[in-house]
Image: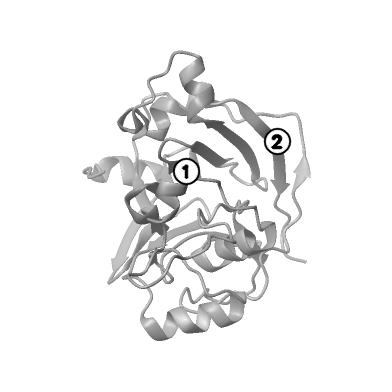
Amino acid sequence: MEFAVDENDLKAAGAELFEDGGRKGVRIHGWLIESRRHSILTSSNVEEWEQKLHTSHLPEMVFGENTLILKHLSSGTKIHFNAFDALRGWKQEALPPVEVPAAAQWKFRCKPSEQVILDYDYTFTTPYCGSGTIEIDKDLNASEISEETSNLHWEDCKEQIDLVSLASKEPILFYDEVVLYEDELADNGVSLLTVKVRVMPSSWFLLLRFWLRVDGVLIRLRDTRMHCVFGGSTNPVILRESCWRESTFQALSAKGTPFDPAVYNDPSIISQRLPIVKQMTQNLVISPKL
């Protein structure tokens, strides 16, 4: 998504854009919001990640240095998104492999001289909904592998993100989309984890999305949305909503949806047709440093 930011909008919001190599972002109302995008893991990095994750399987394309960082400067609260923590979630959840027709099974991960038995979750489905820490005067180096997913405290709540206010025509001061990992499942579908952020004068909003389509078999969508309204002198409150949806192609077809996989290229269009299997809302109240 390319867009031009109006300098008057930035000035009116008290915001400042910055860009340096693979880093870009915005400073606004005590927040530093930054995205970093780089190339996929090198072969040596792949070996390192496999050792640390205790696996011999990784997605075809892992963007190990890609990250989105949102830091509240006065409290040191940092929310960030990275591929390693997401894959650690995949490894821990350890879902059984999605069953595919016998003919298709030969296509998955197959080598010319052997048939690979699928005894792991080759879809790389993850329960990941972000990482976080309280950081004091340090800068997160995205190339370093995180040792702790989160020490932030999220509490269940009944509040919901105000999607109506987000639909208002407020100027966008900063936007980016960061791909964390992707796999085309040997041309039998797609497994994709991305995070998008947009910053407006009144708030920031992000969507972390895991999108899976195993052609002819299964569709899975796991969305995590976060929203923070800038609160002036008060400590900001962040809402986080997670919604997991999934369905088989067979179940969708029984409800009249075409069986053709081409119909399911856009998760935003098909999402409302997928039944919800898990949903929760939480909040994170940021406290000042002691």
Residue positioned 43% across, 71% down in the render: 64
Q: Residues within 10 Å of mark 2 (few under 14, many from 20)?
A: some
Question: As displayed, is residue 91 above or below residue 47?
Answer: above
Specify the label residue 101 is tagged with.
Answer: 1
Specify the label residue 280 is tagged with.
Answer: 2
Q: Residue 37's spot in the image, x, y percent?
A: 34, 65
The type of residue carrying mark 1 is: Pro
Residue 189, picture quadrant = top left
Specify the label residue 174 is tagged with.
Answer: none
Residue 48 seen anywhere in this rendered image of the structure:
yes
Question: Which of the two discs, 2 and 1, sits closer to the camera?
Answer: 1
The type of residue carrying mark 2 is: Met
- Counting residues from the start of the chain, the first of labels 2 and 1 encountered is 1
Report the label total: 2
Q: In this view, does 84 lie to the left or right of 262?
A: right
Question: As displayed, is residue 78 above or below residue 41?
Answer: above
